[in-house]
Image (cartoon, rainbow, N blue to C red):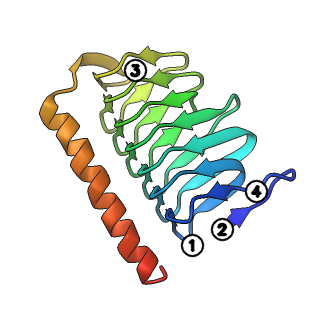
């Protein structure tokens, strides 16, 4: 469901896939080949939400921000993750059920492990692997992990295009 709010209608690239059961409202911009899966909620009702090209917002995610949120390109936001932050970089993996809170910023090529909680105001440098509650950097993202993000992003784009072609 795509809704205008306060005179602002989501802008969605024609190549993007948006599930009919996703809810997108207000000042939201979704880039080329992005994919928004069932149950995702993206609310640009208070501040603008920008989602980059080739980025996946998987099933049952919540994306909202009081200050604006930019999600980079080639990023995967895993099932049921909550993003209520300021910035997610390019080529990032946010694990299933992870939460990234107010004013947090995640650099490029980061991985936030499943179930982790990134505290308000946290700034994680590029290539950080963070896990826990609260999330702490446990090391640098390996080349294998970076490759996994690239492969996962390409897989999601291909799958989304199949859904789109079938009218789902």
**Which residue was labeled with disc 1?**
20
**Which residue was labeled with disc 4?**
9
Q: Quick check: 152 above or below 123? A: below
Tell me the distance, in whole angstroms, between the alpha carbons under discs 1 and 4.
16 Å
Disc nearer the start of the sequence (1/3): 1
Seen at 56% across and 69% down, the residue is 21
**Which residue was labeled with disc 3?**
134
Q: Quadrant of residue 138?
A: top left
Label 1 element class: loop
Label 2 element class: loop
Disc 1 crowd rating (10 Å Cα; few below 14, some 14-19, many 20+) is some
Tell me the distance, in whole angstroms, between the alpha carbons under discs 3 and 2.
34 Å
Tell me the distance, in whole angstroms, between the alpha carbons under discs 1 and 2.
6 Å
Instruction: Give the number of the mark in front: 1 or 3.
Output: 1
Seen at 36% across and 31% down, the residue is 116
Seen at 50% across and 44% down, the residue is 52
Instruction: Report whether 47 appears left or right of 56.
Output: right
Residue 120 coordinates in the image, percent (x, y): 54, 20
Disc nearer the start of the sequence (1/4): 4
Residue 47 coordinates in the image, percent (x, y): 73, 36
């Amino acid at each position: 469901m795509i809704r205008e709010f306060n005179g602002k209608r989501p802008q969605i690239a024609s190549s993007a896939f948006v599930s009919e059961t996703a809810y997108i409202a207000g000042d939201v911009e979704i880039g080329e080949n992005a994919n928004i899966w069932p149950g995702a909620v993206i609310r640009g009702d208070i501040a603008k939400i920008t989602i980059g090209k080739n980025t996946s917002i998987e099933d049952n995610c919540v994306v909202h921000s009081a200050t604006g949120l930019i999600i980079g390109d080639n990023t995967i936001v895993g099932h049921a993750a909550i993003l209520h932050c300021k910035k997610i970089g390019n080529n990032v993996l946010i694990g299933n059920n992870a939460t990234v809170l107010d004013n947090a910023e995640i650099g490029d090529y980061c991985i936030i492990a499943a179930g982790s909680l990134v505290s308000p105001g946290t700034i994680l440098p590029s290539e950080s692997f963070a896990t826990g509650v609260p999330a702490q950097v446990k090391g640098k993202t390996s080349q294998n992990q970076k490759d996994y993000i690239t492969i996962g992003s390409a897989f999601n784009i291909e799958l989304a295009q199949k859904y789109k072609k079938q009218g789902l």
